[in-house]
């Protein structure tokens, strides 16, 4: 029994699921469900379809290089059954998948943290500039506690001279 | 023959339904009959069916025949699937080959566009319908087989074809 990867979305295909399509040049395409199969028949490129793993990896949304991926590499050489080895592997699998999941989550949080910082600075700027929408400026002047602290801003343009009006 | 006639008709569901029941007889309807599909959707979402009387198949060995039309699917009322034996009439043949045009031959279906379930629960389907000509005892007439073949043939005892194959799917 071997767990394959779907050609279109790269999810694992468990036994009893999916369809295998053999092309006449003997290339085998495995699909996890009919959604992926139908997209393939429509000749869609998985690298352009947003919900596939291929797109996400290509556009840096998901982690691409990590040592935890080495464990899942396809090995074509059959191994002699070794009971101790098998038990160790079965114990290691949940640990490895937990490490992989935390690393993937960190990758995504790191990617999204830039947006969080940007949103905070935007909010602060809006608060300083548009506080008059909340309360009128005259009210703010009367009550000292409502105003924001005054900031000195240096202006660097040349001072225009007021020409006296000609009578 | 029936499938091609159906493909030329438009996407009116009642028209397809009528054609299906009248022309195919025992076989199942070869097209989906939904009304809100575009032309391209219908083209890509064919319902693949059995190999039955009138199905043209490609011959993938070097016996001399090029195309064979199925005249009888042995062992099933509905039609032949992957790995079954059919009786066919040679429609197109190479000039110097072991079989001539018009011969009635036996063939083993090695590639079928209809998916076939495997014992582990998965399904396989190929790109086209292809056949390897055999004699009454089940031995292949030709000496080479082209393209991929399924390993369903092993269970059906067509070991010689598997030995000649260049790729086993």
Image: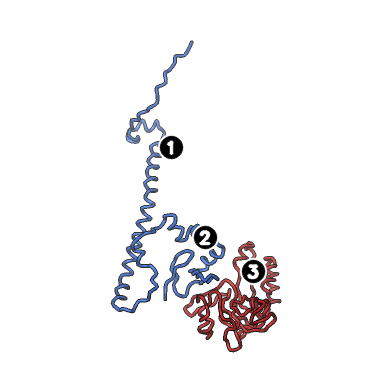
Structural distance between the alpha carbons of marks 1 and 3: 60 Å
Residue displayed at 30% across by 72% down: A91
Please, which residue is most extreme toward the bottom here? B137
- Using the image as rendered, state which of residue A26 and residue A41 is in the foreground: A26
- The chain letter under disc 1 is A
> Would you call the spot at circle 2 few (<14 residues within 10 Å), some (14-19), or many (20 or more)?
few
In the image, which is nearer the foreground, mark 1 or mark 2?
2
In this rendering, the answer to whether B40 lies above or below A81 is above
The location of residue B121, given as percent across then percent down, is 48, 77
User: Considering the image in quadrants, where does the N terminus of chain A appear?
Assistant: bottom left
Q: Quadrant of residue B50?
A: bottom right
**Hey, which quadrant is residue B61 in on the image?**
bottom right
Residue located beneath label 1 in the image: A133
Alpha carbon separation for disc pair 1 and 2: 49 Å
Q: Is residue B163 left or right of residue B57?
A: left
Q: Are marks 3 and 2 on the same chain?
A: no
Q: Residues within 10 Å of mark 1 (few under 14, many from 20)?
A: few
Query: What subunit carries mark 3?
Result: B
Q: Is label 1 on the same chain as label 3?
A: no
Q: Is residue A21 visible?
A: no
When the figure is inspected, residue A27 is found, relative to residue B163, above or below; the finding is above
A94 and A30: which one is in front? A30
Q: Colour of chain B?
A: red
Of marks 3 and 2, the one in the foreground:
2
Up-down: is A112 above or below A37?
Answer: above
Q: Which residue is mark 2?
A: A45
Q: Could you give the CA–CA distance between mark 3 and mark 2, rounded to whole angstroms?
A: 28 Å
- Which residue is at 38% across, 74% downward? A77
Rendered location of residue A46, percent (x, y):
50, 60
- Label 3: state its secondary structure: loop
């Amino acid at each position: 029994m071997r767990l394959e990867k779907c050609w279109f979305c790269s999810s694992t295909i468990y036994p009893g699921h999916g369809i295998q399509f053999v092309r006449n040049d003997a290339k085998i395409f495995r699909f996890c469900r009919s959604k992926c199969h139908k997209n393939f028949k429509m000749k869609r490129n998985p690298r352009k379809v947003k919900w596939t793993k291929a797109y996400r990896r290509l556009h840096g949304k998901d982690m691409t290089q990590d040592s935890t991926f080495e464990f899942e590499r396809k090995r074509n050489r059959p191994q002699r059954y070794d009971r101790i080895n098998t038990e160790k592997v079965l114990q290691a699998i949940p640990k490895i998948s937990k490490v992989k999941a935390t690393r993937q989550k960190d990758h995504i949080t790191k990617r999204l943290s830039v947006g969080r910082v940007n949103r905070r600075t935007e909010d602060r700027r809006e608060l300083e500039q548009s506080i008059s929408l909340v309360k009128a400026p005259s009210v703010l002047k009367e009550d000292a506690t409502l105003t924001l602290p005054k900031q000195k801003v240096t202006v660097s343009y040349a001072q225009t001279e007021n020409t006296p009006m000609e009578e | 023959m029936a499938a091609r006639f159906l493909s030329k008709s438009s996407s009116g569901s009642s028209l397809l339904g009528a054609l299906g029941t009248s022309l195919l007889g025992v076989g199942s309807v070869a097209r989906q009959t939904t009304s809100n599909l575009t032309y391209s959707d219908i083209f890509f979402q064919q319902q693949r069916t059995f190999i039955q009387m009138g199905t043209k198949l490609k011959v993938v060995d070097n016996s001399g025949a090029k195309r064979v039309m199925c005249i009888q699917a042995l062992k099933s009322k509905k039609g032949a699937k992957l790995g079954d034996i059919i009786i066919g009439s040679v429609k197109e043949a190479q000039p110097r080959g072991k079989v001539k045009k018009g011969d009635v031959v036996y063939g083993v279906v090695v590639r079928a566009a209809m998916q076939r379930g495997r014992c582990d629960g998965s399904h396989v389907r190929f790109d086209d319908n292809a056949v390897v000509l055999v004699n009454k005892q089940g031995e292949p007439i030709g000496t080479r087989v082209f393209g991929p073949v399924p390993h369903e043939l092993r269970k059906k005892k067509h070991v010689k074809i598997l030995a000649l194959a260049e790729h086993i799917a």
